[in-house]
Image: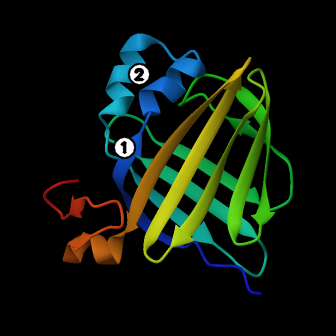
Amino acid sequence: MSKPNYTGIYHMVSQENFEGYLAALDVNYALRKVVSILKPSKHIEHDVNTGKMKIKTVTTFKNFDMDFTLGQEFTEDLGPVDGRKCQTTVNWDGDKLICVQRGEKEGRGWTHWLEGNLLHLVSKQENCFICIYICIIWCLEDNYIKSLTCKTGLKVSDKTI
């Protein structure tokens, strides 16, 4: 089974519990409020032959870059997000990308998967006995421009994002 190619520019369609997730990471109140109202885009370059990926999350406030090779641990600088550094590994689990982040905040990571033209992201932060999840759905730019109704039931167009 061949792995999907994640290359594309995706625009955020919806998010759930983002502020709760940031609180679990000890992100300060003011920054949580600002970040929670942003509508970022995600620019992904994915070389399926070498496993190299570049993921750039772009907002009007701050940008965040990840540059890595699937299956190889790297030091991720989360300064733009929460000021931490961690050891990160991103690998395949079937057709999903699974990220494990080891560092100051244990039990942290995310899962990405494609469903048609939608890029899904579920991030988690295990905090003692509580696991905080966030779900963000991104829409591929080509379809974003045309306007569509996503499986989430949200009407997406260039005016709503």
Residue 106, x across and y down, in percent:
78, 26
Query: Closer to the observer: label 1 or label 2?
Result: 2
Determine the residue positioned at 36% across, 67% down: 151
Above/below status of 100 relative to 20: below
- Extreme-bottom residue of the structure: 1
Q: Tell me the element at label 1.
A: loop
Lower sequence index among marks 1 and 2: 2
Q: Is residue 9 left or right of residue 6?
A: left
**Residue closest to the eye, 148 or 42:** 148
The image position of residue 100, as x and y in percent, is 77, 44
Badges 1 and 2: C-beta atoms under 8 Å apart? Answer: no
- Residue closest to the eye, 22 or 94: 94
Element class at badge 2: helix
Residue nearest the observer in this picture, 127 or 90 = 127
11 or 66: which is nearer to us?
A: 11
Question: As shown in the figure, which amino acid type bears the numbered disc 1?
Answer: Thr
Q: Name the residue rendered at 45%, 56% in the picture.
A: 42
**Amino acid bearing label 2:** Arg
Q: In which quarter of the view is residue 46 placed?
A: bottom right
Q: To which residue does mark 1 refer?
A: 59
Seen at 45% across and 33% down, the residue is 18
Q: Is residue 50 left or right of residue 60?
A: right
As measured in the structure, the alpha-carbon distance from the residue carrying label 1 to the one carrying label 2 is 14 Å
User: Looking at the rendering, in which quadrant would you find the N terminus?
Assistant: bottom right
Residue 118 in the image: x percent, y percent? 44, 68
> Circle 2: is it few (<14), some (14-19), or many (20+) Cα within 10 Å?
some
Which residue is under mark 2?
32
